[in-house]
Structures are given as structure tokens and as C-alpha cells.
């Protein structure tokens, strides 16, 4: 692993006005790469603080996971003084990220005009449910809604009822897409000196994500076949039971299938015209994957792991969330980082998964308590102590003291 050092986003200041998963997940990734992320919360704090918060300190596990590396200030944006404080923060920033609906922001006075007046060069990232100009524009959206409307729930359900992926996959994918757009806008600013507005709609993002492999014949106009990708859609694509456990196995290329047919003592299958090329195998994937399922069940996991590895066929044990914590590979690459949180106690957090030859941030800032950094971030934005005291005493800004 490279030495720990300043990250590639060190020196970039991000103001986050976001709740739940999508926006905070985006900015947490930036914090792990060295950005200074200031989380702006209302006086009650991000709703996610309370999820599974067994000790009542506002530091539930999902909040910690999505917000480590950040600082917190709480502001009542319904007060004019609160809006002015937010705009002062934006004036000091490189990036402003929000997943609030534009109409709600507008009612608070957080308009694009106000943002541009405060800081013409800022990269303003607006993460919304649906893009402007369409029938759904302005509708509220959560992960479940987007999984449904984007087609993901139908794909997951296969020939049965639609079903959701058991993770906030839309929130996290769109959060990463937003991070990609933000960094592209920052690079453009280096070239041109100009700020930019980046609008990242969940629906359109997830529709594009799903269509990559499931648009099928509908990529042509007129369509040349049905939608879908049969290898992903088959009910026989699943973790396979061995005689003593479960494995994730993918037999994919010509070479892999030739090797697998030899391993199971049926080399003649390589001459079957239904299995010779990826086109024919894809068209007959159900029977091939049923064959894999039948054969793997005959022997223990250890046998298959060793044998398939020898023949270059991907095979791994199926981890649970608990066993993932002790996965030997993750341990050996130093994936988990342990820190002492002053309130939540000893924590184990995943590092940023990509590595850089120039180094990665050495330490992670503990997830903030609500309003823990109000004074210092306002001071950095240019407010004097008298003005800060007045905001706190008026109940416009929250503070731990």
C-alpha cells in the first residue's frame, strides 16, 4: 500500500446541505480523499442520526458510516440570519452539495442566483429525484421509489413480483455519480476558472445504469429483440450450494467452459453447438447454469475452491456481513481502519477502497456530533466572535457549548 499522506482532494472545501444517504455518501467519499467537508444540519440534526442509535447520542451506525471525515454546523435556515450564515459558508467553499428539492431550497432563499452571488466560482451540485423539465420533476424520491421507477425492482423480481435490492443501491450509486460529476466540474474550473452547476437526477442515473445490460434489443431502433440480458436474468444465476456450503462461481469465457466440462467428466459438451460460443451459451444459459448447480452440489466447498482456482475459474465463499468483518483478504490489505471516537467509542471503518501512488489521507476525522464545529467553521468563513455569539444566542445556529 502507498504511504499515507495528503489526499488528492486536500485543499478542497465542501459545504454539504444534505440528509439521509445519497448526498452524505457522496461527500463522505470526498472527505476520505482529503476534502474538508462541512455538514450543514438543521437544529434537530440529520434524521439518520437516530437510526439504530441505541445510546441516544445521535451517532447511530449508518450516520457514522456516511459522515465520518466531516465537521458539523447546525443552522435554522428559516431565519434570514441563518441564510446569510449559509451563504457565508458557500462563499468560502469550492463545492456546495445538496439533495434538498429545488422548490424547498427556493422557499428558504437558497436559490442558484443567491449561491452564484455569494461565490461565482463554486461548483454547485444538486442531487434530485427527477431531472427538470419532465413530468416527475419536483417529486419526492427515496431509494425504494427510484428502484421501482428505474426498472431495477422488476429486474430483481424476474418472472415473479418486483422486489427491491436489500440495500440503498440507488442512493449510493447516484452519490458516486454525483462525486464523479463534481470532480469533472472542478477539473473544468482549473482549466477555465468558471464555476458550474451539476444536476444529478436519481431516476435518469439509475435508468442509464440499468439499461447498460438490460436494454437488449431495444438499443436498436426499431427494436431487434426483447429487453434484458438472459445471463443476468436467469433464476439459476445465484450462489451455488456445495455439499457443505455455498460458493459464488462464474463460468464465463470459452476457456472456462472447456475447463469446467473437463472437470465434471463431460468434455463432449464442448462440441455441442448449443455451447460453443458466448452467443449460443447466452441463449441456453438456463440449462448451463443448472448443470453448474447440479455438479457443485456433489462435492465440498474446499474441493471446488482449490480445483476451480487451478483452472482459472472465479470461485469464492459467500460472506455474511459478520464474516465480511474477518475476511482474510480485507485483513491483509488493511481495509479496515480502527479509530477512537470521543463519544461513540472504538470504531472500525472501511478505508477508501482505491489507492493512489501519491498517498491517501493518514487519518479519518470522527463522525461529528450535531453542531460540534459551528464556531470554528463560522470563524473560518470570516465571522467575528461577536457575530457568532449573536447567532448562537438567537437560536439561529446551534453549538455544543
Image (tube, rainbow, N blue to C red):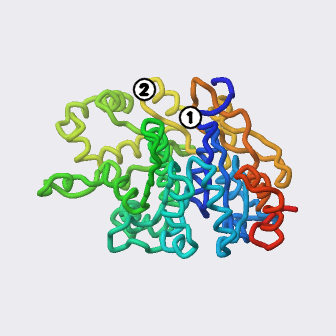
Residue 186 screen position, x and y as percent:
49, 42
- Alpha carbon separation for disc pair 2 and 1: 25 Å
Q: Quadrant of residue 334?
A: top right
Q: Which residue does the image show at 61% across and 61% down from the upper left?
A: 17
Crowding at mark 2 (Cα within 10 Å: few <14, some 14-19, many 20+): few
Q: Could you say whether the residue bearing mark 2 is in a helix, strand or loop?
A: loop
Residue 34 screen position, x and y as percent:
64, 38
Q: Which residue is mark 1?
A: 354
Q: Which residue does the image show at 53% across and 50% down from the upper left?
A: 122
- Work out whether 290 lies above or below 359: below
Q: Could you say whether the residue bearing mark 1 is in a helix, strand or loop?
A: loop
Residue 379 screen position, x and y as percent:
76, 52
Q: Quadrant of residue 98?
A: bottom right
Which one is in front, 308 or 114? 114
- Work out whether 46 lies above or below 7: below
Q: Quadrant of residue 167?
A: bottom right
Position of residue 229 in the picture relative to residue 81 (left or right): left
State the quadrant of the N terminus.
top right
Position of residue 113 in the picture relative to residue 283 (left or right): right
Using the rendered image of the protein, determine whether residue 45 is visible from the camera's viewpoint. Answer: yes
Q: Which residue does the image show at 37% across and 63% down from the upper left?
A: 150
Amino acid at each position: 500500500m502507498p504511504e499515507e499522506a495528503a489526499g488528492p482532494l486536500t485543499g478542497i472545501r465542501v459545504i454539504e446541505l444534505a440528509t439521509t444517504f445519497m448526498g452524505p455518501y457522496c461527500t463522505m467519499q470526498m472527505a476520505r480523499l482529503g476534502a474538508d467537508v462541512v455538514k450543514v444540519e438543521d437544529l434537530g440534526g440529520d434524521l439518520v442520526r437516530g437510526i439504530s442509535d441505541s445510546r441516544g447520542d445521535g451517532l447511530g451506525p449508518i450516520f457514522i458510516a456516511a459522515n465520518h471525515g466531516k465537521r458539523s454546523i447546525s443552522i435554522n435556515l428559516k431565519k434570514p440570519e441563518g441564510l446569510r450564515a449559509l451563504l457565508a459558508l458557500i462563499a468560502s467553499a469550492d463545492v456546495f452539495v445538496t439533495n434538498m428539492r429545488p422548490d424547498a431550497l427556493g422557499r428558504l432563499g437558497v436559490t442558484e442566483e443567491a449561491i452564484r452571488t455569494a461565490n461565482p466560482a463554486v461548483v454547485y451540485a444538486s442531487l434530485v429525484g427527477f431531472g427538470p423539465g419532465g413530468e416527475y420533476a419536483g417529486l419526492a424520491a427515496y431509494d425504494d421509489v427510484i428502484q421501482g421507477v428505474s426498472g431495477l425492482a422488476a429486474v430483481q423480481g424476474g418472472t415473479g413480483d418486483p422486489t427491491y435490492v436489500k440495500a440503498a443501491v440507488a442512493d449510493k450509486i447516484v452519490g458516486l455519480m454525483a462525486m464523479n460529476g463534481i470532480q469533472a466540474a472542478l477539473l473544468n474550473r482549473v482549466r477555465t476558472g468558471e464555476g458550474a452547476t451539476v444536476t444529478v437526477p436519481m431516476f435518469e442515473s439509475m435508468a442509464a445504469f440499468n439499461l447498460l445490460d438490460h436494454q437488449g434489443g431495444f438499443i436498436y431502433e426499431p427494436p431487434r429483440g426483447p429487453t434484458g440480458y438472459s445471463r443476468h436474468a436467469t433464476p439459476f444465476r445465484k450462489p451455488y450450494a456445495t455439499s457443505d456450503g455455498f460458493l459464488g462461481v462464474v463460468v464465463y469465457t470459452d476457456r472456462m467452459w472447456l475447463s469446467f466440462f473437463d472437470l465434471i467428466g463431460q468434455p463432449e459438451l464442448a462440441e455441442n453447438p448449443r455451447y460453443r460460443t458466448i452467443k449460443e451459451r447466452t441463449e441456453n444459459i438456463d440449462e448451463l447454469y443448472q448443470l453448474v448447480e447440479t455438479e457443485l452440489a456433489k462435492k465440498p466447498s474446499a474441493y471446488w475452491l482449490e480445483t476451480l482456482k487451478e483452472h482459472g475459474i472465479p470461485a469464492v465463499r459467500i460472506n455474511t456481513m459478520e464474516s465480511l468483518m474477518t475476511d482474510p483478504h480485507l485483513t491483509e490489505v488493511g481495509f479496515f481502519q480502527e479509530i477512537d471516537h470521543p463519544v461513540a467509542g472504538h470504531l472500525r471503518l472501511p478505508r477508501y477502497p482505491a489507492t493512489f501512488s501519491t498517498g491517501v489521507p493518514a487519518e479519518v476525522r470522527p463522525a461529528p456530533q450535531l453542531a460540534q464545529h459551528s464556531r470554528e467553521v463560522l470563524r473560518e468563513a470570516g465571522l467575528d466572535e461577536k457575530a457568532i455569539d449573536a447567532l448562537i444566542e438567537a437560536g439561529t445556529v446551534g453549538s455544543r457549548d
